[in-house]
Image (cartoon, rainbow, N blue to C red):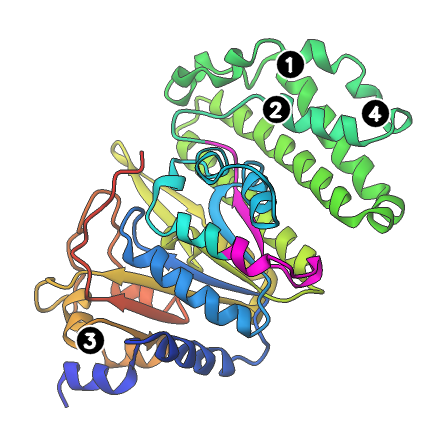
């Protein structure tokens, strides 16, 4: 039997929303435990087919009891979106601008997602609404912000009697925010404030605040669980930001890998917090680049070296086990024969879901990897297949990347 015939036999065509729902129902039914977190990846940002697939899937999952979605965007900024989908009065254009980091408010499919969530939540009680979360750290390629906003939020939440001694002169420690946001610090450790005396003092403040909140959980989490969870999110974010700034000040050869691993650690911590926060309401869908969600180490070239770090998906997968499901996605309808993308394109005219184990078994050992479609596209390799639970391949896209940056 040819490879194309084998792949056609094992895949599920996703021609209609009904087909999509049935294929995912069958995939999830094979799990020993129902998932707490279903991860859908994309191979790059800005190609409309992937967020539109996500939107379609979410509509089905909500019917199956899912009550939240988490995107690769700043966890703190995302509260603007969550407020809007819960009925807030902010204008949608402002929500897309302020509620998404990385310029992702301009990615096709995100406006439609936000409007659908708002419409779905209208007139529903809070326990049945679909919540919107970001799970990314508030960092960009240009640098990281001051911890002022995050730490101030926590200090305003806590009664003054619970403020740790380390926070006594916190305003004097922050200094000018431009000291923290200097873009030169991304490439020049000497330009970073992260190893200064006041940055080290603020790391102690952040650590103390996380400790205070954890020890006070029996009181605050029972009194107002939503406000408590928000405060803990801000405290953890401040702690992570200060670790990130400290790593920016390092001169070690693995500096970039350390920064990437710290971001992944914050992502994983945020996802696990979302799972915990939503456990009484239902599972969550998370959508991000495949590289963040895969159950393996990630890598990227940095000069003559290769930066390697544990992805957020690898960390979350270790914590959740069977309750973490990862579906990677890719495209490449015109890929050359002899590549994974070429073989998958032969098996579908539009899009299809391939369970990972039978797909891996059906592929020739000599099969290669296709070329990137656009900037930032990381084509799936044969090795990536066995590290996922399934692959969704989209054949009916021209691969046009909308400018969102």
Pick whichever of labels 3 and 1 is earlier in the sequence.
1
Q: Which residues are magenta?
A: 117-139
Residue name at image x 64 percent, y 67 percent: 282
Q: CA distance from mark 3 to mark 2?
A: 48 Å
Disc 4 on helix, strand or loop? loop
Identify the residue under disc 1: 174
Identify the residue under disc 3: 348
User: Residue 127 location in percent, x, y?
Assistant: 70, 61
Mark 3 or mark 2: which is in front? 3
**Disc 1 and disc 2 in contact, CB within 8 angstroms:** yes
- Which numbered dot is residue 336? none
Pick whichever of labels 3 and 2 is earlier in the sequence.
2
Residue name at image x 45 percent, y 60 percent: 295
Q: Is residue 95 magenta?
A: no
Q: Is residue 135 magenta?
A: yes
Local crowd at mark 1 within 10 Å, few (<14), some, or many (≥20)? some
């Amino acid at each position: 039997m040819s490879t194309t015939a084998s792949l056609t036999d094992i895949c599920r065509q996703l021609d209609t929303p009904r087909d999509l729902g049935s294929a995912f129902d069958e995939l999830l039914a094979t799990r020993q435990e129902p998932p707490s977190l279903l991860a859908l990846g994309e191979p790059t940002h800005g190609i409309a087919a992937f967020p539109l697939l996500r939107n379609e899937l979410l509509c089905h999952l909500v019917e199956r009891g899912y009550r939240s979605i988490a995107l690769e965007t700043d966890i703190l900024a995302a509260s603007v979106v969550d407020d809007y989908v819960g009925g807030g009065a902010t204008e949608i254009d402002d929500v897309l601008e302020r509620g998404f980091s990385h310029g992702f408010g301009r990615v096709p499919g995100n406006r439609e997602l936000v409007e659908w969530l708002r419409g779905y939540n209208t007139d529903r009680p809070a326990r049945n609404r679909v919540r919107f979360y970001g799970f990314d750290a508030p960092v960009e390629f240009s640098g990281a912000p001051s911890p002022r906003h995050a730490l101030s939020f926590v200090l305003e939440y806590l009664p003054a009697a619970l403020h740790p001694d380390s926070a006594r002169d916190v305003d004097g420690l922050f200094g000018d925010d431009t000291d923290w946001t200097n873009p030169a610090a991304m490439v020049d450790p000497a330009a970073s404030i992260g190893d200064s005396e006041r940055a080290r003092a603020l790391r102690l403040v952040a650590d103390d605040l996380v400790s205070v909140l954890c020890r006070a959980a029996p009181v605050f989490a029972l009194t107002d669980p939503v406000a408590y969870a928000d405060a803990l999110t801000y405290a953890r974010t401040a702690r992570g930001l200060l670790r990130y700034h400290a790593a920016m000040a390092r001169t070690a050869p693995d500096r970039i890998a350390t920064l990437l691993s710290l971001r992944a650690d914050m992502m994983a911590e945020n996802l696990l917090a979302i799972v915990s926060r939503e456990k009484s309401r239902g599972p969550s869908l998370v959508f991000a680049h495949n590289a963040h969600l895969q159950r393996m180490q990630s890598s990227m070239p940095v000069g003559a070296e290769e930066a390697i770090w544990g992805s957020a998906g690898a960390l979350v997968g270790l914590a959740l086990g069977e309750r973490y499901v990862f579906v990677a996605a890719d495209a490449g309808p015109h890929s050359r024969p002899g590549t994974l993308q070429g073989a998958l394109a032969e098996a579908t005219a539009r899009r299809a879901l391939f369970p990972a184990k039978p797909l891996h078994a059906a592929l020739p050992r000599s099969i290669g990897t296709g070329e990137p479609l656009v900037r930032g596209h990381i084509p799936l390799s044969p090795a990536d297949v066995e590290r996922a639970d399934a692959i969704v391949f989209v054949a009916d896209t021209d691969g046009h990347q909308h400018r969102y940056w």
